Structure formats: C-alpha cells, structure tokens
Amino acid sequence: MIKYLLMTLLFLIPITSVSQSVKTYIPERAFQYLPIVYSEAERLMPDMPYPYYFGSLIEHESCISLKHSRCWSPTSRLKTSREEGAGLIQITRAYNSNGTLRFDTLSELRRSHIQELRDLSWGNVYQRPDLQIRAGILLTKRNHKALHMVKDPWERLAMTDSAYNGGLGHVNKDRRLCGLKANCDPQKWFSNVELHSVKSRKPLYAGRSAYTINRQHVHDTLYIRMPKYQKHYKENLM
C-alpha cells in the first residue's frame, strides 16, 4: 500500500505543474489527423475496445506542451547522438555508444508489414503522417496481440501502452517478476505489475528514471489524456 501511495504521488507531480486544460483541450492540429487515426484504427484493429487511445498516445508522444509547434506535428523530432524519435508516434531508432545500430523500429515494422508500410522509410518518414499513424497502430496491434493472456481489456491496454514506451520484452519480464512476488497478480497492471520492474531506477532524463518515465507514460496516456479523445470519438463517430 505504501508503494502504491508513493507511486500515486509521483504521478500527480507533473499534473499539478501544468494547466488542467490538458484533460479537456485537444490541440487544433489534432483535428486534421484524427479522422485518419480513427479510420486506420477501425481498419487495422477492429477488435480494439479503445480506438480513441491512439489520439492520447499521439498527444503524449508528440506534444511537449499543448501549444508547442511540435504538438501533433508529423515533423516532431527527438534527436540525440544515441536516439531519434520521429513524427506523431515518435517511431524510434537507437545507437550503441560505438555508433552501431541498436534497434530500428521503423525498419522492423516495415519488414513485418511490407504491404502496409512498403512506402515508409527514414528518408520520407517526416513527410508521411498517414504512414506514421499506420505504423503506430500496427506496433500497438502487435503488442496488444502478444498480451492476449491478459483477459481484462483495461489491464491489457495498460500493459500494451507500457510496451509501446519501453518494449514488450520489458513488460513480459515485469510480469514474471510480479508473479514471483507475494500478492502480485501478473494479470493486473495497476497496483500489481506497475510496482515491480526490471527497468532502471537511475535518473536518466530531467531526473526521471526509465522506470518512472514508463509508468508515467501509462498513467498520463490512459487517465489524463484519453478521456477527452473518448468524448470526441463518441461525439463524432458513434
């Protein structure tokens, strides 16, 4: 219980430091792309119980703030010497310290979904928001399918979101770690798997660890941002 209270307080810190409008305001540029998001979600993941999730995911990935020029922009870019995150969904490639490629999510997805992503490359990724959106949905679909053993749809979505941010392999390891702990259910993310992780707790970016970043990603995307996209989806498509 103490760990859960600490986790809750940790999640509340960034929320109180920004305008509450993050819970209600949808950035203007989002309306340009949301029809594509919803139609692609329906086509590629017709069994997805939360199709409006993708709006909140894109907002979390691309928006430093709701008014930032990169918010909901296909040219949004996070670039360091070790990593590049591209576009609306921050599709990523990363490098080892010696300059060799560590992983390339874009190329991996293109190989796995050649019919859908044939025209997507690092040469044109910033000019193809439609394919950025498609790639993000396909990556989510892959992780969501791999977590089929998690029966509760909400818990499964939380784990899927954690996998989007930190990798499916880490979610599987965290679930196994949870299963070894007393009173921890690997079928449940909230108050269970979320409290146990193999991820580093060493400060990484702005004093936040890989563990903190990942857990905040789930909380922010599902609880803070998604309700407004759910409202928009129901008002426009249902």
Image: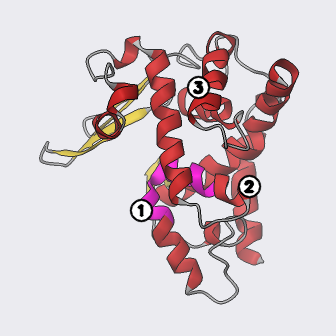
**Side of 154 where 210 appears, left or right:** left
Q: Is residue 161 above or below residue 33?
A: below
Mark 1 secondary-structure assignment: helix
Kind of residue indicated by mark 1: Gly
Label 1: how many Cα within 10 Å (few below 14, some 14–19, many 20+)? few
As measured in the structure, the alpha-carbon distance from the residue carrying label 1 to the one carrying label 3 is 26 Å
Q: Give the residue displayed 55% in from the left and 72% down from the top.
A: 175
What number is the disc on residue 169? 1
Nearer mark to the viewer, of 1 and 3: 3
Q: Secondary structure at mark 3?
A: helix
Q: Residue at x 70, y 86 (%)?
A: 183
Q: Is residue 218 above or below residue 227?
A: below
* Residue 67 visible in image: no
Q: Position of residue 192 (x, y in %)?
A: 68, 73
Return the residue at label 2.
154
Question: Mark 1 vs mark 3: which is more N-terminal?
Answer: 3
Residue plotted at (74% across, 36% down): 225
Label 2, secondary structure: give it. helix
Q: Quadrant of residue 156?
A: bottom right
Q: Nearer the viewer, residue 52 or 69?
A: 52
Image marks 1 and 3: residues in contact by CB distance under 8 Å: no
Percent across and percent down for residue 235 are 87, 21
Q: For mark 3, what is the residue?
A: 40
- Where residue 114 appears, x then y in whole percent? 32, 31
- Residue 169 belongs to magenta span: yes
Secondary structure predominantly adopted by residues drawn in magenta: helix
Q: In the image, what residue type sits under mark 2?
A: Trp
Q: Amino acid at mark 3?
A: Glu
Magenta region: which residues?
158-171
**x, y percent for residue 179:** 58, 82
Residue 33 forms part of the magenta stretch = no
Per the model, the C-alpha gap separating discs 3 and 2 is 21 Å
